[in-house]
Amino acid sequence: MIDTDKYEGHSTGWKRKTNHSTYSIINDDGQKVASVPCYEECNKDSQLVADAPLLLEEVKELRKDNELYLACIHASQFRHLPGSAMSKLNQERFLQRGEEE
């Protein structure tokens, strides 16, 4: 899992600028964050880089949602029944551990 804490303090609102051969990713302070050389897929690559702060925020929000869902599942009085959300979650975790080995 990605350690999102290492990105704390990053700038937000990145934008793209082009000069025919390169896309430059510029932060809020006008500083160049990254450059992507132009080739056939450069438009998509540079947009992905420019959207990195938005994607990071989405990951953080989804993790918060997951924690809330897990808390609800653990609090459920039906968590021990076969077919319950908790039972399915434990089965999925078991399968994932087997794939990691």
Image (tube, rainbow, N blue to C red):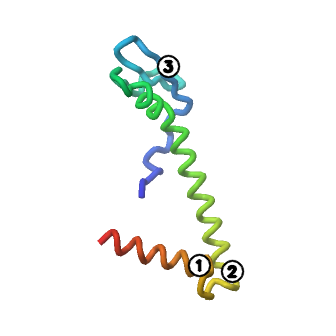
- Where residue 12 sits, quadrant-wise, is top right
Judge the density around disc 1: few (<14), some (14-19), many (≥20) Cα neighbours within 10 Å. many
Q: How many angstroms separate mark 1 from mark 2 (CA)?
A: 9 Å
Which quadrant would residue 100 be assigned to in this image? Answer: bottom left
Q: What is the secondary structure assignment of the residue under circle 1?
A: helix
Split into 4 quadrants, where in the image is the N terminus? Answer: bottom left
Q: Are marks 1 and 3 in contact (CB under 8 Å)?
A: no
* Distance between mark 3 and mark 2 Cα atoms: 50 Å
Residue at image position (42%, 27%) is 33
x, y (%) of residue 73?
64, 75
Residues packed near mark 2 inside 10 Å, few (<14), some (14 to 19) or many (20 plus): few
Q: Image point 40% across, 71% down: which residue?
A: 96
Residue 86, numbered circle: 1
**Residue 19 location, x and y as percent?**
40, 11
Q: Classify mark 3: helix, strand or loop.
A: loop
The residue most toward the left is: 101
Q: Which residue is mark 2?
A: 76
Residue type marked 1: Met
Pointer 3 with pointer 2, Cβ within 8 A: no
Residue plotted at (62% across, 81% down): 84
Three-letter amino acid code at disc 3? Gly
Query: From what the image shows, is residue 12 above or below residue 89?
Result: above
Q: Of helix, strand and loop, which one carries label 2?
A: loop
The residues tagged by marks 1 and 3 sit, at their Cα atoms, a distance apart of 48 Å
